[in-house]
Image (spheres, helix red, strand yellow):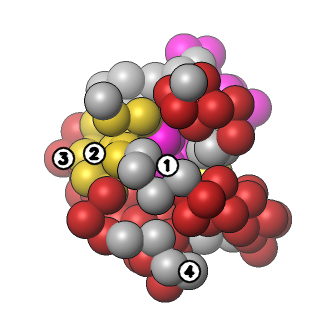
Amino acid sequence: TDQELFSQNVKDVYFDYDKSDIRADQQTSVSADVAFLNAHPNVNFTIEGHCDERGSAEYNIALGDKRATSVKNALVAAGVSASRIKTISYGKEKPFCTESNEACWQQNRRGHFVYQQ
């Protein structure tokens, strides 16, 4: 199904601490996401902005929004229709990893893709 293909092919984009610009080492992932999304123009999706546990809830909601928007802008610049993309920020409210160390925090600083029915 499109949803299974989406889950297998579209990868999250990770960010440095306190940053919302897409890192150089994430460009390959973004390019692969673009290739899949342009080949599947009927797929709509949400980009969730996530942060690690450090900083206030308010600060991280704003940072998560910047991260989600940064990923959306990169996709749109590469030809993905903006009308297919929603963004939302969860800040630090929905961590992927819950340990208090850099390895875990890195996993939480991301733009996460969610397939929309």
Q: Is mark 4 on a helix, strand or loop?
A: loop
Q: Which of the 4 quarters of the picture holds residue 70?
A: bottom left
Measure the C-alpha gap from mark 2 to mark 1.
Answer: 9 Å
User: Residue 59: percent from the left, percent from the top?
Assistant: 26, 52
Relative side of 104 to 75, left or right? right
| 2 or 67: nearer the viewer | 2
What amino acid is found at the position of numbered circle 4 in the picture? Ala
Q: Does residue 106 show up? A: no
The crowd level at tag 2 (other Cα within 10 Å; few <14, some 14-19, many 20+) is many
Circle 3 is placed at which residue position? 58
Magenta-drawn segment = 98-113
Q: On screen, 3 above or below 28?
A: above
Q: Is mark 1 on a helix, strand or loop?
A: strand
Nearer mark to the viewer, of 2 and 3: 2
What residue did someone put label 2 on?
A: 89
Tag 4 residue:
78
Q: Which amino acid does label 1 sit on?
A: Gly
Q: Position of residue 62 (x, y in %)?
A: 25, 57
- The answer to whether the residue labelled 2 contacts the one labelled 3, judged by CB atoms less than 8 Å apart, is no
Disc 4 packing (10 Å; few <14; some 14–19; many ≥20)? some
Q: In the picture shown, does residue 93 fall above or below 35?
A: above
SS of the residue under disc 3: helix
Q: What element carries label 2?
A: strand
Q: How crowded is mark 3: few (under 14 residues within 10 Å), some or many (20 or more)?
A: few
Q: Is residue 114 left or right of residue 58?
A: right
Image coordinates for residue 41, horizontal then vertical, percent: 46, 58
